[in-house]
Amino acid sequence: MTNNTSVLNWITEMKNLVVPDSVVWIDGSEMQLEKLRKQACETGELIKLNQELLPGCYLHRTNVNDVARVEDRTFICTKNKDDVGPTNNWWHSDEAYKKLYDIARNSYKGRTMYIIPYCMGQVGSKFSKIGIELTDSIYVVLNMAIMTRVGQNVLDALGNSNDWVRGLHCSCDIDDSKRYICHFPEDYTIISVNSGYGGNVLLGKKCFALRIASYLGKQEGWLAEHMLILGVENPNGETKYIAAAFPSACGKTNLAMLIPPEGYKKKGYKVWCVGDDIAWMRIGADGSLWAINPENGFFGVAPGTNRNSNPNALETIKKNTIFTNVVQNLDNNTVWWQGLDQTPPENAIDWKGEPWNGKTSNEPGSHPNSRFTAPVVNCPCISKEFANPEGVPISAIVFGGRRAHTTPLVYQSRNWDNGVFVGATMASETTAAASGKVGVVRRDPMAMLPFCGYNMAEYFNHWFKIGEKLGDKAPKIFNVNWFRLDENNKFIWPGFRDNLRVIEWILKRCDNEVDAKETPIGFLPYAKDINTDGLNINLETLESILNVDNDMWKDEVADIEDFFKKFGDDLPEKLKIQLDILKSMH
Ligand code: GTP
Ligand code: SPV
Ligand code: MN
């Protein structure tokens, strides 16, 4: 498939390490993928679903100990500890290689090595990057074939270049005590052992497109971000693009695939999805910020996805989709998850593979982090710019988290530096997307805490530098929070499609079309300026989520100060200045 010596030498080295019974190059052809699907069904790795109702769809169950990313077992491996900063787990690269090679050694015995050449971004585009993942899992091959561009044309595009990311995945025994997800940014290398779950093993995604890419972006002057990209087309047919960073399971896919509320639809508004999880952003020839989505598929959260919350996602996953850890309805061999509809199947198998009756069981049948893997081309609202190798120009950057209290529905930062501060001090309640406790508020700068491949203090500096280069062409920076709770723990803001009402305010602010009130944290909307036509929310309630509670923000400031202390002398001066400004205003 290739004469590239750097590729062939590395594969030989890895083959000698893991000792597979056989080797298969993935050429990206439908014929080969179909053969693999068949094979996986024979071993039970995949379950073929009802092909009339769900053509090309399959179900997979991961090991019960292996259902989410494992942040405590994720490492950035370098020669110097300082290079990874206080928010990453560090491992000396020499020691890490030794330990990982010990685990990987002979682990492909009796198995096949699949060699997946893949491309993040359009094949042949100067903004795209190539990787090769070795895996012993057909599930990984089939997911990578949806999530990335895979096959011979990738190797052709690579030619003799040494500029590609090495990725070794070994399923081993899915032993969680020996599970490691390791990144060697200095060597463009990723090694993942003892897992079979998405973000741990689809190495093009979080490992490459965020952790390694953020490191590359730092050196090459661009940004790799945990952001959705969406286009809002107004009734005049003009489209403006927004990039938004929310932590895992905090609403990126839902916002990216939004269908406008009735009133907006009637007026002629349309929303286009460019990406739902990752954005690579560069300063374009015109001096403004341009973003591409390097992925080719969606790896989305299943629970909560339904005809009301996200009809475009439901449409997207009707065919050629792999479902992971959802309920299998035995009556018609389809799938179900919590929040799909009000009628859970009674004759079913749950995500653990046990018989499950949705009527009588007290346990949810789908895992809270159960997922679908679906090709981008399936999405009814996919932007025509998705395939544009130059990407789309970004008018606004939006940060957001899941906060029951404190953070208002939306506010605008004063300027780029203040916006970087807003991003750097973001906090959100933890979700089921990573192992560990759910619902704990933690600082998650730019939604990148688990994904930044180097010292986050440097990362903040990098953001400031990008802002300096952009100057007055810089996108405006905002913060949103769809998740404020009332005294009965119910969401106050309706969310989902109605988030377009907030996006409209954001875009108006970008065009200086609406006033705002200045507060210590930035510019907040006047409640009257958020369009609530057709919504069941009164002005008073809206005002209650557009307030800045001084006492709560005092606590917030104290917590930010604590968080910043972690970075010691590395903390950028500009962040200290921003914190001082915020403090002085309280
Ligand atoms: P990752 O794929 O993990 O990066 O997640 P994501 O950021 O794409 O989150 P996603 O859109 O899948 O939403 C995660 C959960 O949040 C789902 O259960 C959604 O139903 C819920 N959610 C999304 N948007 C909203 C909203 O506007 N309001 C409320 N209340 N819930 C939302
Ligand atoms: C996330 O956790 O942010 C995801 C899913 O998008 S995973 O690919 O597992 O990282
Ligand atoms: Mn994500």
Image (cartoon, helix red, strand yellow):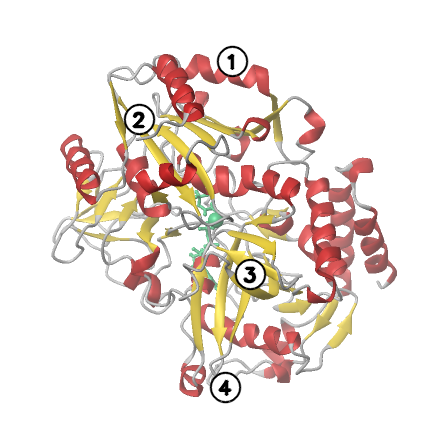
Is 441 left, or right, of 462 in this rendering? left
Q: Which residue is identified by label 2?
A: 136
Q: Mark 3 near ligand 1 (CB under 8 Å)? A: no
How far apart, in angstroms, are the residues tagged by discs 2 and 4? 54 Å
Q: Residue at x 42, y 37 (%)?
A: 158
Q: Secondary structure at mark 1?
A: helix
Whichever of labels 4 and 3 marks the residue nearer the N terminus, that label is 3
Answer with mark 4 or mark 1, whichever residue precedes in sequence: 1
416 relative position to 249: left or right: right
Q: Disc 2 and disc 3: Cα gap in Å?
A: 35 Å
Give the CA distance from mark 4 to mark 1: 62 Å
Left or right of 141 in this view: 578? right
Vertical placement of 358 versus 504: above or below?
above
Q: Residue 148 at x, y = what percent?
A: 37, 45
- Look at the numbered disc 1 and say if its residue's Cβ is closer than 8 Å to ligand 2: no
Residue 151 visible? The answer is no
Q: Amino acid type of disc 2? A: Asp
According to the picture, the residue beneath numbered tag 4 turns out to be 533
Q: Secondary structure at mark 2?
A: loop
Amino acid at pointer 1: Lys
- Callout 2 crowding tier (Cα within 10 Å): few <14, some 14–19, many ≥20: many
Observer-nearest of 421 and 345 = 421
Q: Quadrant of the N terminus?
A: top left
Sequence-wise, the earlier of marks 2 and 4 is 2
Question: Residue drawn at (44%, 85%), measured in percent from left and top?
Answer: 263
